[in-house]
Image: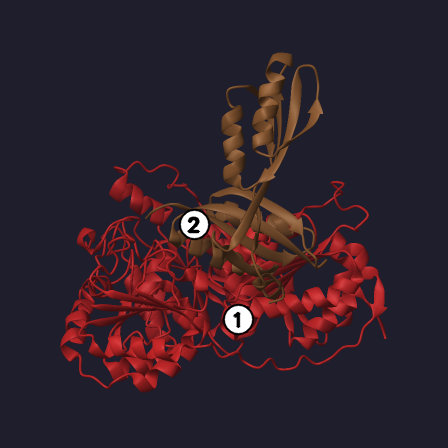
Chain colours: A brown, B red
Amino acid sequence: MALKKEVISIFVDNQSGVLARVVSLFGRRGFNIDSLTVSATNEPTISRITIVFKGDDLSLAQIISQTEKLEVVRNIFTLEKEGSLFRELLLLKVKAGKEDRTTVKEIVDIYRGKIIDLSKESMIIEITGAPEKIDGLMNMLSCYEIVEVCRTGITAIERGWQEKEKQND
Amino acid sequence: MKFTGSQIVAEILLEHGVDTVFGYPGGAALNIYDALYEYRDQIRHVLSAHEQGAAHAADGYARVTGKTGVVFATSGPGSTNLVTGIATAYMDSVPMVAITANVPSNLVGRDAFQEVYITGITLPITKHNFFVNKIEDLPGALNDAFRIAGSGRKGPVLVDITKDVTAATMDYKSRKMPEEPKKVSGIDAEELKNIADIINKSKKPLVYLGGGVRAARAGEELGAFLKKGDIPAAHTIMAAGVLDADDPHNSGLIGMHGTIASNKAVDNADILLAIGTRFSDRVALNPKKFAKKATRIQIDIDKSEINKNVLVDIGMVCDAKDFLTALMPFIEKKDRSEWVGEVMELKKTTGDVKCDDADLHPSEIIGTVCDMTDKETVYVTDVGQHQMWAAQYLKHDKTCCFLTSGGLGTMGFGYGASIGAQVGAPGKRVIHFTGDGSFHMNLNEACTAVSQQLPIITIIMNNSVLGMVYQWQTSFYGNRFSATEPGRKTDFVKLAEGFGLKGFRAANMDEFTEAFKKALKEKGPVWIECIIGKNEKVLPMIPAGGTVEDMIIG
């Protein structure tokens, strides 16, 4: 069966140890996770976990039905590409002295990134956007010496109105 | 009224109808045990020799009574000793609430004496667990624990309470738990009719039932369904005893040591209706070839079981009893005697090959035990060869009277579970089958059976080797008996006397029958050591990953 990438949103009780429960389950069942982010929501008792999962339909169904069983999980659903917005934040430190500075800045400008730190030898770039855009920038910068990369992983939200209802299920 | 945390624990137990608990005290649990002393007229506490025994006892108690078993332990080693018992209950979906005391909250996280992070340790082996370090959270956590343990697919829940919470006080008003209305599964009427339709059209349907049918207490409904549709049924070890062993539709145990009848039937069936079972690797030994000719239908209360191990064509999330009750009216009365005959004919062919290195044989021992006990008897096993023999040869005929560690396969489960079973069903005869390997693991619980005066009869099948592993080494490892010939010199008769109970030894059938007759008259626990041959095998056998084609019969 074909492997595909799925973004899953999980609403959980905002209490200590919740992340450990979710991660322990993934570890025990051997689910393959590309990235995982946790964030607060507008409801203080609820947090949102967004995971990017690679697998076939069967393992996707397993991860959802197993996660659903956790007491702390209020709701879980996959986010369809068309109806959702996926964003990531990237902080990247690149080695760039005076001869490279302008060309790196040009690339960063095209991707609508920001240069948030500058030294004689290096610059730090900040960019948010869809994962493909971040991959694109990384690719363009790969011919320079990248010193450090920090990528948050995807956080995602559905377009339109349905969001509110899901959270309160 | 002001209550201490410990009194609240006792009050909430009473609210949930708990009158019996198992456990072992300790420093952090002193306050809780002080409250148990105060409530001793209403809550019976059974003290074990080791916390593992207490956990298995709570498990056995739950399996026999259908109620949630409760076990207490202190912090640190007290709670880690529960782990195997909790994992056993988790794998077999047994409702259990484990209450552990932890060090005072100001010491938590400082590696205090007897401190352990038990909620972290039990994360993957409980349905849920709670760490309570504020007394306000205590009633909610305990009530939730009982709700979670006893609902849906049942299982263990752990509540860890810091010592300061057990001493703190708060206003609490005890209340009677309202009877929770039984949740009826939301059955999709169309899907149900579709399933009935498929079954009605089928020429060779087979039911494959597991522990879920037993947990739902749906034996009668299943029996009626099989009769009406004239459909044979194969059961997992967890469902042994759901159908009468002699039921004309019961083809017997399925899987690695299952009957030829059941394993052939699953291979030839055109419909496989799996109810409350997970297609485990001991049944669907080769998941790709399991029931390959059949349309596979799976009914389970736990959605995550559908398609987990073997792909099915239709899955329905539903309680087994609700499903069978709803399905019944749509099932046409049929005569499938040709198919049933084809399946049941093979039930006569067993793998009972007696080895001649001893005069006593497991099949005869078990047969005699069945003949000399009534239908209400509770049979408990440990894990290994004797467990499989018990599953194969016992004439099970009452739901919930066969207690075995099916999922985790816990050697040492048996004695603790027998204690729980006998405490939970004082009027019933409890027979514990064990091997010399399993029994050596937790025989310390004999002191509990003695102090509680529980007339458990333990039948030790002593072949002087670790039989199941020894069998595999014989069959698959060229007789390289690595660590399976312990060379022990344990004198079980003397050991029994040392514990203050009666012990017998039998080397042939006459001796066994004589000893068993005497054992039945004893008021307290009894052991009968049975000398069997080390070459006695569990047969038939399908090797791991194999199919019915690879079956070893004799």
Pick the front one: B416 or B406: B406
Number of numbered tags placed on the structure image: 2
The answer to whether one can see residue B54 in this image is no
- Check disc 2 and report the residue beneath it: B437
Looking at the image, which residue is at 52% across and 74% down? B66
- Is residue A53 shown above or below A13? above
Same chain, marks 1 and 2? yes
Where is residue B146 shown, x and y percent of the image? 62, 69
On screen, residue B336 versus residue B297, left or right, reads left
Q: Subunit of mark 1?
A: B
Quote the CA–CA distance across marks 1 and 2.
Answer: 23 Å
The crowd level at tag 2 (other Cα within 10 Å; few <14, some 14-19, many 20+) is many
The crowd level at tag 1 (other Cα within 10 Å; few <14, some 14-19, many 20+) is many
Where is residue B84 shown, x and y percent of the image? 54, 52
Looking at the image, which residue is at 18% across and 75% down? B340
- Is residue B30 shown above or below B334? above
On screen, residue B535 versus residue B300, left or right, reads left
Where is residue A117 shown, x and y percent of the image? 70, 25
Circle 2: residue type: Gly
Where is residue B105 shown, x and y percent of the image? 79, 51
- Check disc 1 and report the residue beneath it: B422
